[in-house]
Amino acid sequence: MMQHAPIFVFIACLSASGVLCSADENLAPAEIKVGGAVIDVTFGPGPIDLPAPRIVAWISTAAEAVTEYFGRFPVPHPRILVRPTAGRSGIFRGTTYGSGGGFTRISVGQHTPQQELDDDWMMTHELVHMAFPDIAGDDREHHWIEEGMATYVEPIARCQTGKLTAQQIWGEMARYMPQGLPSEGDRGLDNTHTWGRTYWGGALYWMLADVQIHQRTGNKKGLQDAMRAIVSAGGTIVHEWPIEKVLKTGDHATGTTVLADLYNRMKATAVQTDLDDLWNKLGIQVSNGVVTFNDNAPLANIRKAITTGR
């Protein structure tokens, strides 16, 4: 398995005067250096109980996961705006845009405890979006492929940096992936714009692609290779690509036609997937919320390879 250089993260918190801030200074701008990128972090007006370095460390952890999965951080100089929200806790309203080299804004409640930062998925989800191009054409038509990619890749990236266990990932997928299955009246992923089909139907497409790439390459390559190739070719949020270019670039990297074939099957047709059968083949067993693995299952080695990474 190919190894890559370790990830180095440099965080500098700056006060208004431009000097390094101490841990008790709140809401100071910051600079994160990770995966070949420099990320500028700023704060909107309002209070947050936790000091700024804790918030910056949370963002850095997410950026490290993205770097691990894609081999580098996808854009060289993105910006992140953290918007404090008084009187509440939690992380919410994350959105990411391609403008200005990549821009994410996300809200953090004033009383958000450290544990919520440690358990959060949204920051990683938003930064994963930076590793995929804006798809040309009708925004609604292909919204599923962008949101589905971030939904599927986010937990795998966090697993590869040790922030989630494989049991957590597959347990969540077994629980939520059925929301992505087509229901009556479905007209395929390009034409069905429900929440479930957009996020979990999109995630289902990418999961099936991941498994099939591993199968067709004798478990030598997976979706991670395709996604790294797309980023390396410039397929990031700051560029607009037709969907055919995305699929062709990813397929070329794996020596297969999985992405294009699966898209052509699922884009305008309600393709049903027997998830119970797939979990069994991957060796994933869930009983009363407890996940166990059967390493003798026919696709168990593929399950392991997906979360182990490149």
Image: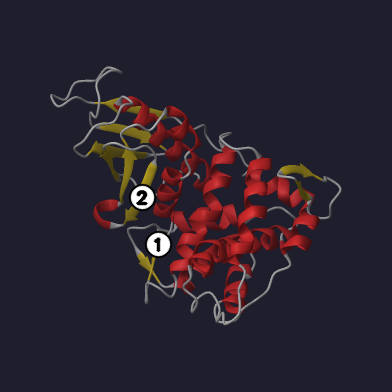
Work out which residue is located at the far right of the displayed protein and give it: 296
Judge left or right: residue 165 versus residue 31. right
Name the N-terminal-most of marks 1 and 2. 2
Q: Position of residue 240 (x, y in %)?
A: 35, 67
Instruction: Say above or below: 242 vs 28.
Output: below
Measure the alpha-carbon separation of dots 1 and 2. Answer: 18 Å
Residue 134 in the image: above or below residue 40: below
Residue 40 in the figure: left or right of residue 296: left
Task: Identify the residue at image location x=24%, y=37%.
Answer: 42
Does 28 appear above or below 1? above
Q: Secondary structure at mark 2?
A: strand
- Residue 1 in view: no
- Colour approach in the figure: secondary structure
Q: How many marks?
A: 2
Amino acid type, label 1: Pro
Q: From the viewer's perspective, is the residue at label 1 or at label 2 nearer?
A: 2
Q: Are marks 1 and 2 in contact (CB under 8 Å)?
A: no
Location of mark 2 (residue): 94
Q: Quadrant of the C terminus?
A: top right
66 or 118: which is nearer to us? 118
Q: Report x, y in % for residue 215.
A: 74, 60
Q: Quadrant of residue 261?
A: bottom right
Q: Quadrant of the N terminus?
A: top right
Q: Residue at x 53, y 74 (%)?
A: 189
Residue tagged 1: 133
